[in-house]
Every structure is written in structure tokens, then in C-alpha cells.
Image: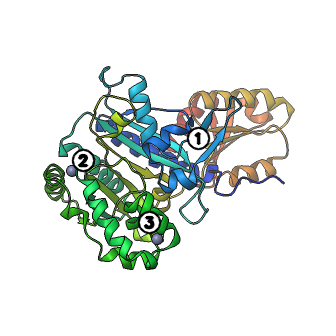
Amino acid sequence: MIQSLPGFKDILPAEIRKWQFVENICRDIFESFGYQEIRFPVLEKAQLFSRSVGNDTDIVQKEMYTFKDKGDQSVTLRPEGTACVVRALIQHNLIYKGMHKFYYVAPMFRYERPQRGRLREFHHLGVEAFGDPSPYVDAEIMEINMEILKKLNVDVRVEINNIGCKKCRPLYIKVLKEYLMEKKGLLCEDCQRRLNTNPLRVLDCKKESCRKVTASAPSILDYVCNECKNHFNEVQRLLTKMKVDFVVNDKIVRGLDYYTSFVFEIISDRLGAQGTVSAGGRYNDLVEELGGSPTPACGFAAGEERIIELFDYKEDDRFVDAVVVPVGKDAMDFSFFLTENLRKEYIRSEFISSGSLKSALRKANRWKAKWVLIIGEDEMKEDMVSLRDLERSVQKKVKVKDVISVIRRGLDE
Ligand SMILES: [Zn+2]
Ligand SMILES: [Zn+2]
């Protein structure tokens, strides 16, 4: 038997309604905030991510599905959406065409050790807003998150940080590196390497020994420039007005290099080690770094699998509303075309083409259908249908021309 790859998951019909429900709510919210859907390719040039996410990040170093295609081009299965949206923005000159706010619902790929809450193919619900440097955009991004989580009744906490800009961050990195160098021996192997390539990442390390070292590390908040500080203060002022409960956590650096100033993580304690439900922030330099004109930007991506896990949803496992059962050969054609008529009215219907009435009823029960339509010789003669309501266990004869309206009424009840 051939099984799916580790970290790749089928989403089966029993779960799909929950996915559709979450996606529909998110789409409605994104669009009410003025975002437009964008779809970008699964495969991009590898350099798009090494230049945006950053060469010294775990994503690029260890986690990307990068390979040479048959044309000897180095390509990557997208590990995140922001770089793809920025690439499309520049390529199609979208801002010039009046488009500046985008959302996407899309699978992403990272080669990580599969564990609870971490798959190799996972889904992001994301938005990106371009062209506006004001803190109101950051507040809007947070408001979208809060709306989604409120609608889905998911309990979370919000942590925010200011990670500075290309003007002020280098100074902090220098100070941090000096501090960490003194304690190098206490850091894990990965962090000893990061110390030289990307010292900020050490703040991200989940290992206890590294956390002890970083607990008393200098804080980035003491090193950011006035512009970054003012922006961050304004975002906090707005969040407070919006009644968002947040804490400032100066250890949040996010696993990607492109962020500037405001960053955030929305975390649930019900998910174990992989508790981040949604994360994002500002990335004012990325568009320029990827070859566009300087364009401030802000966005986020939420993990759909994690939202799904947190969100309580009463499962509706009825896949079929009505089952049409002909009794005897003469009723076959009539029943088949009656089923077609139900389907044209968007009543989900199954036609049973063989077997006994008893086995047909068993199928209808397993499918949790509400109605069974039985058509035999008598019914044919009288131009009637025997309509059985499986929920109430009652059966009556109904004129063929009235069947659809009776079923409609029963389904709406
Ligand atoms: Zn700054
Ligand atoms: Zn470490």
C-alpha cells in the first residue's frame, strides 16, 4: 500500500466543512477590510526566499523544499506567502494599478520534523497591505486577527515587539553579539553557529540553556531609533484603544529576516509547543530589497490547521439530503430523472440503482439523509412518491409535483 508522505495530510470529507467554515469567515472578514484575493504559484525561484526570508534563517537553511528542475533552474516550493505576494506586486506593477491590499488562502511547504501542530504541508490564511507607513495599518492587521478569533470563539494571548529598522537594528545586533560571545559556551550548537550568522535568531531558540542566557540579554527596546520607537508607541496606543490585551515581549524576533519595527505573535496555550496561531508585522524594506520601489508594508499569516484545532465546531456529517429508491425495474427511469430534478434544485440527492429496499434504507441511514423517496408500481400509477422522513420516522404519500416544495420546507425547518 502506498501511503502519503510524512507531514502531508489528507483532509477528508468529514473535516472539510470545518475548513470551509473557517475559510469563509476569513474571506468575509478580509474582504470587509478591503483586501482582494491573490493566488500565486506553488513553485518559485529559490532565490526569492533566500533574498527575502533571509539566508541565515532556519527556513532557508534547513526547511525549504528546494531542487533543480529539468531546466537546471533552482526552484522552491513556497515556504510562506509574503515573498510571493511582493514578487507578484512588483512583477505586475499592482500598486500603480490601484491594488494594494491582498489576501491568500494557500498551502505552504517546509521540511520540518513532523509533530503535533507541525506538518510539512500546512495552510496559511494571510493578508498583506502595501503603501501606508502609518500605525493605523498595523492596528488594522491586529483588528483583522481579533475579528477572526472572536468569530471563531478562540482564546489567545497577544505578544508584540519592536525589532527596529535597518538604521537602528545593526547597533543592537552588535551589542547582543558582544553579550552572547561572553556566554558562548552555554549556548546550544545551533546558537553558536547563529552567533556569527544571525545573532537575533538566538533570542528565538526554545532550548532551556539558551533561554537562560537570553533572559538577561540586552533588550532591543533600549536600542531602537526614535522613528521606530514612535511607531511602536502609536501601535500600542491604538491596541489599547481597541481593547486588545497584549504584552510586550522583547524576545520575539520572528523566524524571518524581513520584518521592521512592529511584530506580533498570537499564541494559544492549548496547542502545546507549537502554540503560535498567527504572526506577522511590518516589513518596510522588503519591496525595495526585491527590486521594487520603496514601499512600506504590513501583514500577517495565520496557521489554518492550528485555528481548526482550536475552534469548536459542531460537525454536520450529513452529506446527502435525499435518497431516491426505485422499487422494481419499471420505476428506474422515473426515479433517476426525479433525482436529477432534485439536484437541479440543489437538494443533495443520491439515486440507488440496485439492491433491495432494505439495503437502500441502510445506506440512507449511514449517509444520515433526512429523506427517502420510495417509488414503486403503486406510486407510479398514482403519480405519487412515498416520502419517508428518517429523522421523525414518518412516511406519507406526496404528489410528484409537490415533492420538491415539501422537501424544501422540511430542510429549512
Ligand atoms: Zn529604527
Ligand atoms: Zn539555542
Asked if ligand 2 lies within 8 A of label 1, the reply is no
Which residue does the numbered mark 1 point to in the structure image?
76
Numbered mark located on residue 95 in the image:
none
Mark 3 or 1: the one toward you: 1
The CA distance from mark 2 to mark 1 is 30 Å
| Crowd rating for badge 3 (residues with CA inside 10 Å; few <14, some 14–19, many 20+) | some
Judge left or right: residue 359 versus residue 278: right
Disc with the residue nearer the chain's start (3 vs 2): 2
Residue 161: image location, x then y, percent: 27, 60
**Numbered marks: total:** 3
Q: At x 48% / y 49%, what residue is drawn? A: 55
Which residue does the numbered mark 3 point to in the structure image?
275
Q: Secondary structure at mark 1?
A: strand
Disc with the residue nearer the chain's start (2 vs 1): 1
Callout 3 amino acid: Gly
Which residue does the numbered mark 2 point to in the structure image?
138
